[in-house]
């Protein structure tokens, strides 16, 4: 499987959820009638993934007396259900998804319980570098259960065929290598960039902006990419120039992130994805049923301006809605679900019986380090180093409550620039104007 993100996060759905939520920004849900019971109760867990193995859930029930009813809902529909139930102050689930991009909104609306009231979240920090992505107004609203971040992947066989023997560490070197791959005939269009107007394009730009040495928004939500000399502006130019110069396949104008990974990178149609998902080597590119490049794709420390650059995080978390019926029981589930032992097993450390379908990268460093030491994680050394030392939140101050509308502005305007219907200058101005408007409360 490609990753836990087996969906396309459409801007329209996100925006509608945002409007619903922000329209109620002053109305936190009333206290829901809940029970502190943890023995002999059944909790509902709603996520966008298939459930963990029955054996693992049975072990949790045996140890705690808590039964789990698992509800699998596609990501877009799940966000709509979370918003609708929270706004209506009705029960939906005891534990559910907290996406990194929704933290600011969920925190502002007070739709999720502060988990520090239920768990020793301070003790999680050292082993969970991405925990900060789930803090809003000083409260932990979710615990990361997968350590997703953007990283660079390369098809080493194609690079070698083009005569490239030393892997690039800067964007200039990386671009020159892509041009060599094209000019040598090894790859007509060597670079995968998903230019469909969807969330994957937004996150690709965030990662490229970080590689160019900058950030997208400041702590007040003000745009940091308006100036042509800014990292975000240069990142947009570099991406759009990739299409114009033929480095990116022309058909990528309407290709989403997962489509590009599955139909281009996994099939040898391109030689590199600059902002790929961590875990894709082991969960997609090295799987014979889904890939024709098994053993040929590796992670490359993402090139930056003067050397290896940073990597932005886009992890998934799990939290407790304020409308939950069994909050204490849900907290015990989250504690187990995000434990080192469970994550090690979910990722294949204990054999096939405990593998969590679609799960590929634990949020705990200790679990990744153990998987790497046991030889059970493809590219584990690189992934461990990135998670430990260079992975950082897209928004250091936390994703703003109006993020969904901002992301829609990012991907629709970058898509238009790549399609040639507007210039990069106009696209950056439109995105900047949107950020200014949203951050000012308009």
Image (cartoon, rainbow, N blue to C red):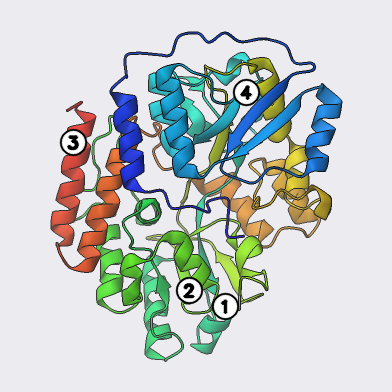
Q: Residues within 10 Å of mark 3 (few under 14, many from 20)?
A: some
Which residue lies most toward the bottom here? 185
- Earlier-in-chain disc, 3 versus 1: 1
Residue linked to disc 1: 156
Q: CA distance from mark 2 to mark 3?
A: 36 Å
- How far apart marks 3 and 4 lie (CA) works out to 34 Å
Q: Residue at x 80, y 31 (%)?
A: 60
Helix, strand or loop for disc 2: helix
Badge 1 or badge 2: first in the primary sequence: 1
Which residue occupies the foreground of this view, 89 or 259?
Answer: 89
> In the image, which disc is placed on residue 313?
none
Nearer to us: label 3 or label 1: 3
Q: Residue at x 31, y 39 (%)?
A: 15
Q: Nearer the viewer, mark 2 or mark 3?
A: 2
In the rendered image, which residue does mark 2 sit on?
264
Q: Where residue 199 sits: x, y (%)?
A: 38, 50
**Quadrant location, the C terminus:** top left
Q: Residues within 10 Å of mark 2 (few under 14, many from 20)?
A: many
In which quadrant of the rendered view does residue 145 lie? top right
Determine contact: label 2, label 3, CB under 8 Å: no
Evaluate if marks 3 and 1 touch, with contact meaning CB atoms under 8 Å apart. no
Residue 436's disc is: 3
- Of badges 4 and 2, nearer the viewer stands 2
| Callout 1 secondary element | helix
Quadrant position of residue 404: top left
User: Residue 264, position in %: x, y?
Assistant: 48, 73
Query: What crowding class fits label 4: few (fewer than 14 Cα within 10 Å), some (14-19), or many (20 or more)?
Result: some
Q: Is residue 101 left or right of residue 96?
A: left
Pointer 4: what residue?
A: 121
């Amino acid at each position: 499987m490609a990753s836990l993100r087996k969906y396309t996060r459409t801007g329209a759905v996100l925006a509608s959820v945002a409007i619903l939520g922000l329209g109620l920004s002053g109305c936190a849900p009333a206290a829901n009638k809940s029970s502190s019971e943890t023995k002999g109760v059944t909790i509902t867990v709603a996520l966008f993934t298939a459930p963990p193995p029955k054996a693992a859930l049975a072990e949790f029930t045996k140890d705690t007396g808590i039964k789990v009813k698992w509800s699998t809902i596609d990501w877009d529909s799940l966000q709509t259900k979370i918003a609708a139930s929270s706004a209506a102050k009705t029960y939906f689930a005891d534990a559910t998804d907290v996406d990194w991009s929704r933290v600011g909104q969920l925190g502002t609306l007070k739709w999720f319980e502060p988990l520090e009231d239920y768990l020793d979240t301070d003790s999680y920090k050292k082993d969970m570098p991405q925990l900060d992505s789930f803090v809003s107004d000083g409260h932990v609203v979710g615990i990361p259960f997968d350590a997703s971040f953007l990283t660079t992947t390369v098809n080493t066989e194609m690079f070698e065929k083009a005569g490239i023997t030393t892997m690039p560490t800067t964007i200039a070197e990386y671009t020159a290598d892509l041009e060599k791959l094209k000019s040598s005939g090894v790859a007509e269009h060597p670079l995968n960039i998903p230019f469909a107007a969807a969330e994957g394009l937004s996150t690709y730009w965030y990662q490229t902006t970080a590689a160019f040495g900058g950030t997208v928004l400041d702590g007040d939500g003000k745009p940091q990419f308006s100036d042509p000399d800014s990292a975000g502006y240069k990142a947009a130019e570099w991406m759009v120039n990739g299409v114009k110069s033929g480095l990116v396949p022309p058909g990528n104008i309407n290709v989403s992130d997962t489509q590009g990974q599955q139909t281009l990178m996994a099939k040898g149609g391109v030689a590199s994805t600059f902002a790929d998902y961590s875990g894709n080597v082991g969960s997609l590119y090295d799987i014979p049923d889904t890939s024709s490049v098994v053993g040929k794709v590796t992670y490359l420390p993402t090139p930056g301006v003067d050397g290896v650059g940073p990597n932005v995080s886009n992890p998934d978390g799990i939290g407790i809605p304020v409308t939950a019926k069994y909050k204490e029981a849900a907290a015990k589930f989250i504690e187990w679900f995000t434990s080192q032992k469970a994550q090690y097993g979910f990722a294949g450390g204990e054999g096939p019986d405990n593998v969590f379908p679609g799960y590929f990268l634990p949020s705990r460093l200790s679990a990744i380090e153990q998987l790497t030491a046991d030889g059970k994680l493809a590219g584990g050394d690189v992934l461990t180093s990135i998670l430990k030392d260079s992975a950082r939140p897209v928004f250091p101050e936390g994703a703003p409550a109006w993020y969904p509308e901002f992301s829609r502005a990012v991907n629709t305007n970058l898509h238009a620039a790549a399609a040639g219907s507007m210039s990069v200058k106009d696209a950056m101005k439109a995105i900047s104007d949107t950020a200014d408007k949203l951050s000012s409360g308009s």
